């Protein structure tokens, strides 16, 4: 199986072509510090070729959901060191996914401070999970130009912090409607300065962040996650093909580790401009290694690799409930389905108590 074959990211040798996708689990403490259960959780899944950590807040402003981890102070860094050490001791590799949620948050969990965004436009038709239950989204505060420059610097510092914590690299979460994604599309970015308007201007923030992180930690250590055909969190663009083709072409100028592309996971019948074949349309737009994400099984993941566009497949919920997923794929063994009720928050139940194959 190609899924079980060794592969490489730069000089990093990976034991197979299966990645564990980033997944929010909301089990950090109120100060964004991960605990011993988190250490065990990642240790159990060290047989993945590459682990991408749950999304990690780059600053206090970046926080969107309660009990999500950070990497912007020393206590947080020290806690992550235990995770990376145990993953490495068990033969695994791990990247830190770096996160700024932008408008995908609520002041309830931000000490009363409004979320920020490229423009003062609220998410419509959805609610946000807060520490006080589901709440309608607030209208965010539009970022000043100088604040944007500062956030770029915070991403670079977070990348340095991740390397101090022992991660093998970092991934920018530029998908699923979070701050970088908000800058990219028209529905959330109506700025008239250098960060808004044209495709080039709307791509500027993401490109500046990626360049800053590469400059901070070096070649083949920075990846990016993109969701070109996902409208979730009120992310709508009139011409996503042109937008993301430009972005991917521009990213080719940087020595990146990979580009992780998410499949179209939501109905887009009323959005005919959104390609359903994400890998076929956007994969050829970049020279970088492609990691395909979103809804893959053992069979469909193998078939995707056979197409020759993606070099790795990342699995999300299957890694939650099958910590030894590569072994189960090897044996074509029965897979355990995840308990959706225990995905977010809580303790070991639904986190570290899923069984290994006998």
Image (spheres, helix red, strand yellow):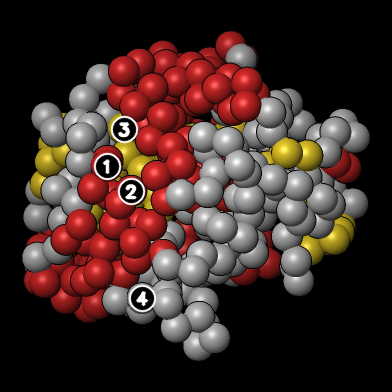
Residue 190 location (% of width, % of height): 63, 50
| Residue at the spot 56% in from the left edge and 58% down from the top edge | 186
Say which label, 3 or 1, has the lower sequence index. 3
Image quarter for residue 349?
Answer: bottom right
Q: Which residue is mark 1?
A: 250
> Which of label 4 and label 3 is nearer to you?
4
What residue sits right under mark 4 in the picture? Answer: 275
Residues at marks 4 and 3, CA–CA distance in whole angstroms: 26 Å
Who comes first in sequence, dot 4 or dot 2? Answer: 2
Q: Quadrant of the N terminus?
A: bottom left
The residue to which callout 3 is attached is: 222
User: Residue at image x 31%, y 70%?
Assistant: 278
Q: Residue at x 11, y 29 (%)?
A: 11
Q: Earlier in the sequence, mark 1 or mark 4?
A: 1
* Distance between the alpha carbons at the discs numbered 4 and 2: 16 Å
- Image coordinates of residue 115 in percent, x first then y, are 76, 40
| Residue hosting label 2 | 247
Image quarter (top left, top right, bottom left or bottom right) of the C terminus: bottom left
Is the residue marked by circle 3 packed among few (<14), some (14-19), or many (20+) residues within 10 Å?
A: many
Instruction: For marks 2 and 1, give the CA distance.
Output: 5 Å
CA–CA distance in space, label 1 to label 4: 20 Å
Report the residue at 75% width, 47% height from top: 120
**Mark 3 to mark 1: distance in Å?**
15 Å
Q: Nearer the viewer, mark 1 or mark 4?
A: 1
Q: Is residue 142 above or below residue 156?
A: below
> Relative to residue 127, is residue 26 depicted above or below?
above
Q: Give the percent coordinates (x, y) of residue 76.
A: 59, 20
Proximity of marks 2 and 1: CB atoms separated by less than 8 Å: yes
The location of residue 147, given as percent across then percent down, is 64, 24
């Amino acid at each position: 199986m190609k899924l079980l074959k060794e592969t490489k990211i730069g000089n990093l040798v990976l034991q197979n072509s299966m990645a564990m996708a980033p997944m929010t689990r909301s089990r950090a403490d109120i100060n964004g510090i991960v605990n011993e259960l988190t250490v065990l959780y990642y240790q159990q899944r060290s047989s993945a070729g590459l682990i991408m950590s749950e999304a990690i807040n780059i600053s206090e402003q970046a926080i969107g959901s309660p009990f999500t981890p950070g990497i912007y102070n020393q206590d947080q860094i020290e806690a992550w060191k235990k995770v990376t050490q145990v993953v490495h001791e068990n033969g695994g590799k791990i990247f830190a996914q770096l996160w700024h949620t932008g408008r995908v948050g609520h002041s309830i969990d931000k000490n009363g401070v409004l979320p920020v965004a490229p423009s003062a436009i609220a998410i419509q038709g959805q609610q946000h999970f807060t520490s006080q239950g589901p709440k309608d989204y607030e209208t965010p505060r539009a970022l000043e130009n100088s604040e944007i420059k500062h956030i770029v610097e915070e991403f670079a510092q977070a990348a340095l912090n991740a390397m101090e914590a022992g991660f093998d690299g970092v991934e920018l979460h530029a998908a699923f409607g979070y701050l970088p994604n908000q800058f990219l599309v028209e529905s959330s970015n109506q700025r008239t300065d250098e960060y808004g308007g044209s495709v080039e201007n709307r791509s500027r923030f993401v490109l500046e962040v990626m360049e800053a992180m590469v400059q901070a930690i070096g070649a083949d250590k920075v990846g990016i996650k993109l969701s070109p055909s996902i409208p979730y969190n009120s992310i709508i663009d009139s011409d996503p093909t042109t937008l993301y083709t430009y972005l991917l072409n521009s990213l080719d100028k940087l020595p990146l580790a990979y580009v992780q592309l998410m499949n179209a996971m939501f109905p887009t019948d009323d959005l005919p401009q959104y390609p359903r074949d994400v890998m076929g349309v956007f994969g050829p737009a970049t020279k970088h290694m492609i990691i395909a994400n979103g809804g893959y099984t053992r069979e469909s993941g193998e078939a995707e690799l056979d197409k020759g566009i993606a070099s790795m497949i990342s699995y999300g919920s299957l890694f939650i409930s099958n910590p030894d997923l590569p072994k189960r794929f090897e044996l074509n063994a029965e897979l355990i389905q995840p308990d959706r009720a225990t995905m977010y928050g809580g303790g070991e139940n639904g986190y570290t108590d899923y069984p290994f194959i006998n």
